[in-house]
Image: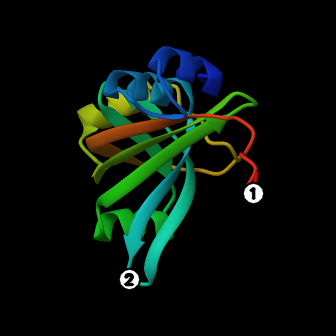
Amino acid sequence: MTIGAAELLSRAAIPGRVGEVGVELCWRALEATSMGRLGVATDAGVEIYPINYAVDGTWIYFRTAPGSKLTAVTAHPQVALEIDAFDERAAYSILVKGTAERVEAPSVLDEASALSLTAWIPTLKLRWVRIRAHEVTGRVFRREPEPEPYP
């Protein structure tokens, strides 16, 4: 279940319009959702891929099929994962910067396979990748009417 933006705003207890989200609350938001955007450098530039993922401790796992995403994270393992949410009262953005690695060890594959992670579309995604987070940050925004430009 996703943490709503207003709920995160109240948990973060920010005094103004914009505030930082603590690392523990960032992880709670990551655990509460399963869809994000993965940023990866490629030889042609930066690519952004929508992924569904699962969190296990401080590891973030996703599955993929052979193709451009797997090639990119293998060649350029420094990645970023971003999630966000908004409602009428608030918005938040959580950013994870880390290193992606293919999961190939049988014991780690068994652990990953036990996670609750299902593909969104009916395709075989048999390659597991996990992200070791190096930096987890978040911001929360109180949504209010925009001020008049010329009062």
Q: Is residue 4 above or below residue 107?
A: above
Q: Residue at 38% across / 71% down in the picture?
A: 41
Number of numbered discs present? Answer: 2
Local packing at callout 1 (Cα closer than 10 Å; few below 14, some 14-19, many 20+) is: few
- Picture coordinates of residue 36, whole percent (x, y): 55, 45
Q: Is residue 126 visible?
A: no
- Tell me the amino acid under the disc marked 2: Asp
Q: Nearer the viewer, mark 2 or mark 1?
A: 1
Question: In terms of image quadrants, where is residue 22?
Answer: top left
The three-letter code of the residue at mark 1 reads Tyr
Q: Residue at label 2?
A: 43
State yes or no: discs 2 and 1 in contact (Cβ < 8 Å): no
Say which residue appears at 57% left-offset and 29% top-offset.
33
SS of the residue under disc 1? loop
Q: What residue is disc 1 on?
A: 150
Residue 80 image-quadrant placement: bottom left
Q: Is residue 12 above or below residue 64?
A: above
In the rendered image, the vertical position of residue 45 relative to residue 7, given as above or below: below
Residue 58 picture location, percent across and down: 29, 30
Give the spatial CA distance, label 2 vs label 1: 46 Å
Left/right placement of residue 19 relative to residue 1 reads: left
